[in-house]
Image: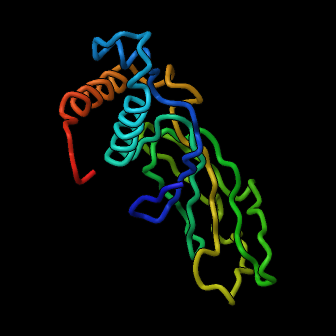
Amino acid sequence: YYTDDNGNYYTDDSVVLPLSLDSVKQWLKLDVSDTSQDDLLTELIQTASRFFEFYTNRILINKIVRYTEDLFYQIYEFTIGNFQNLLYFRYLNRDNEWTDVPADLYSITSEVGNWRLVFNNFSLVPQDLSISKPYERLVIFFVAGYGETGNLIPADIQTGLLNHIAMLYENRGDCNLC
């Protein structure tokens, strides 16, 4: 997994690339049947993908995101784009046991680029938070991304990735420090 500046972490165990090697080879005008550069091209696809995800705060291929918080708030706003679904919302109770927050206590709204988890009635929020652990007492796991495969990524984003990969490929050069 890897983390962002806010401490959220993402699974990165997906073997699904947002672009196929064949589409990258065609974009670079390489022989599709030549496999001698497949490892390099795979690295470049991964590099361009991570660059895109970091700078846009959008996820290309579905990943599980873990968000932690210390306290309950009326509204949790997430700028991590492409929300798919909530896996669970739990808190650490006074007995130091993870407990699901009842789904009828909150609602989820989603817009392009961000989504919100809002408590319907904040006075009903559980009051038995752990006192032995003052941080990361709430955890929200959700899935974000354009989908399970790269063909669900919008065409303009695919083109941007291909252009970034072409720039990386054409400017790779020898480097004794790498």
Could you tell me how many numbered marks the image carries?
0
- The x, y position of residue 22, in whole percent, is 43, 15
In the image, residue 129 sits, relative to residue 43, either above or below, namely: below
In the image, residue 163 sits, relative to residue 8, either above or below, namely: above
Q: Residue at x 50, y 47 (%)?
A: 115
Farthest residue in the front direction?
Answer: 176
- The x, y position of residue 117, in whole percent, is 57, 54
Q: In this view of the protein, which residue sits in the foreground, 27 or 175?
A: 175
Q: Is residue 166 left or right of residue 76?
A: left
In the image, residue 21 sits, relative to residue 65, either above or below, namely: above
- The x, y position of residue 66, in whole percent, is 58, 57
- The x, y position of residue 9, in whole percent, is 52, 58
Q: Residue at x 63, y 42 (%)?
A: 85
In the image, residue 97 sits, relative to residue 10, either above or below, namely: below
Q: In this view of the protein, which residue sits in the foreground, 17 or 54?
A: 17
Q: Residue at x 33, y 43 (%)?
A: 51
Tell me which colouring the rendered structure shows: rainbow
Q: Residue at x 56, y 70 (%)?
A: 69
Q: Is residue 123 left or right of residue 156?
A: right
Q: Is residue 103 left or right of residue 13?
A: right
Q: Is residue 86 left or right of residue 49?
A: right
Q: In this view of the protein, which residue sits in the foreground, 72 or 167?
A: 167
Give the quadrant of the N terminus.
bottom right
Q: In this view of the protein, which residue sits in the foreground, 3 or 97?
A: 3
Farthest residue in the bottom direction?
Answer: 132
